[in-house]
Amino acid sequence: MVADIVLIVLKQKKVIQFQIKNLLTLRSLSKFSKTINDMKFQSSKVFDGFSTVFRQWKADGTHCRFLHGYDVEIKVYFEGELDSRNWVWDFGGMKRAKGNIDGHNPKEWFNYMFDHTTVVAEDDPFLSRFQHMDSEGIIQLRIIPSVGAEQFAKYVFEKIDNFVQEETNNRVAVTRVDVAENHKNAASYIR
């Protein structure tokens, strides 16, 4: 009698395992189908040639606390549906955009922010000295919440994503921004 009960339980366990395996297969197929239906196009645009000086005043014990400059390169990734021209984003559209970022068309904004500029954090203890050098025409000062490749990536992401979504009626969004200080060091901010 005990042997019969064990045999029944084992048989039911196999049936249950078979049903669970088939259910997982159906779920996997469903996820795969959903993934295919949710696929979008991506493109990217590089903005480069920016000679940018900054310092990370909180970087005690490193040379990054001093003013230093890089040939900054920024890569923006776009994702969305194709437009009538089969483009995710019009690469030349940065110049022809209807909207702007802080009063500049996007291409001008990148130049304004990063080309031959000194970028400092709004909480830099020497901010007033940088402002004085700016007023004397010694530097072109840009003040942002925080500095460094990671913070530049976040700052650009937030500025450009709002612009892109407005420009495309939410058809396209920015999914990632990479900021390279040079060919060895880069940071990303990702949706």
Image (tube, rainbow, N blue to C red):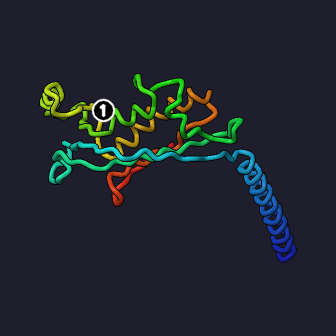
Q: Quadrant of residue 21?
A: bottom right
Image quadrant in which the N terminus is located: bottom right
**Which residue is located at x 65 percent, y 41 percent?**
87
Query: Where does the image place residue 106, in percent across and percent down from the top left?
Result: 45, 32
Q: Which quadrant of the structure image shows residue 79?
A: top right
Q: Amino acid at mark 1?
A: Ile
Q: Position of residue 129 (x, y in %)?
A: 12, 30
Side of 51 relative to 30 (left or right): left
Residue 66 visible in the displayed image: yes
Q: Quadrant of residue 112?
A: top left
**Picture residue at 34% right of the left edge, 48% below the top:** 72
Question: How many numbered marks are there?
Answer: 1
Task: Give the residue displayed 17% in from the left and 29% down from the top.
Answer: 137
| Depth order, front residue of 13/25 | 25
Position of residue 104 measured from the top left corner of the image (x, y, whole percent): 41, 26
Secondary structure under the numbered disc 1 in the rendered image: strand
Q: Residue at x 40, y 24 (%)?
A: 102
Residue 152 vertical position relative to residue 182 in the rendered view, above or below? above
Q: Position of residue 70 (x, y in %)?
A: 28, 50
Q: Which residue is mark 1?
A: 144
User: Badge 1: how crowded within 10 Å, few (<14), some, or many (20+)?
Assistant: some
Question: Is residue 190 in view from this perspective?
Answer: no
Q: Nearer the viewer, residue 113 or 185?
A: 113
Q: Residue furthest bottom?
A: 3
Query: Is 50 rendered above or below residue 100?
Result: below
On screen, residue 113 versus residue 126, left or right, reads: right
